[in-house]
Image (spheres, grey):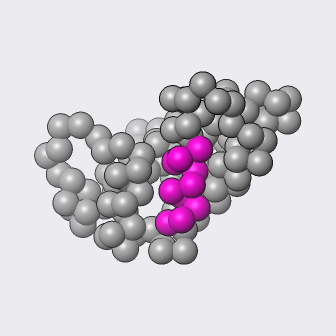
Amino acid sequence: RLELERAIEHVLGEDRLDEAERLVETGMYRAAAAILGVVLEHSLRQLLEKYARQVGLTGERRPPTLGRSVRILSDSGIIDGTDLELLQRAVTTRNSAVHSLEEPTAEEVRLLLTVVREFVAKYLGDEKAG
């Protein structure tokens, strides 16, 4: 059953990244950022679940925010320090896109797309985000 779940998550994750890329290509930056935010959030949660004991998150009622998830994983040494700044920029772009009236720029969302793709490939490998 776990293998089936992973296979489904892999396909859905790839579809969502491809969908976000199509949205960027058509100028729908806010929509692309929202989708990428979902993929990033799910990916971070997968890592937090995988390393729950190491990061000390067992028994928490609510999942941490995107920014807190990045900090927890970085402080625990699970995310490389070199990736921290890019992930923080990605979180800022996502938050701005979904909470602000100002439209994100093409450059911001393209960077978000790159960061999420690379994060999923580097940290989840075969356990790609759904």
Locate residue 99 relative to residue 115 in the image: left or right.
left
* Of the pair 66 and 10, the residue shown nearer to us: 66
Q: Does the image show residue 27?
A: yes
Task: Locate residue 19, reporting x and y percent.
Answer: 73, 32
- Looking at the image, which residue is at 31% across and 44% down? 64
Residue 39, by quadrant, is top right
Horizontally, is 35 left or right of 70 in the view?
Answer: right
Up the image or down, 86 lies above or below 12; here it is below
Q: Residue furthest right?
A: 26
Q: Which residue is more in the foreground, 11 or 30?
A: 30
Q: What number of labels is visible?
A: 0
Q: Is residue 128 magenta?
A: no
The residue lying at 45 percent from left, 68 percent from top is: 79
- Percent position of residue 1, x then y: 41, 39
Rendering coords of residue 124 (x, y %):
52, 58
Q: Measured along the vertical axis of the image, is residue 12 above or below residue 46?
A: above
Q: Which residue occupies 42% across, 46% down?
A: 66
Residue 87 colored in magenta in the image? yes
Residue found at x 60% / y 25%: 101
In this image, 33 relative to 39: left or right? right
Residue 95 in percent (x, y) is at 51, 38
Does the image show residue 4? no
Name which quarter of the figure residue 61 lies in: top left
Our reading of the magenta stretch's main secondary structure is helix
What's the magenta region? 84-93
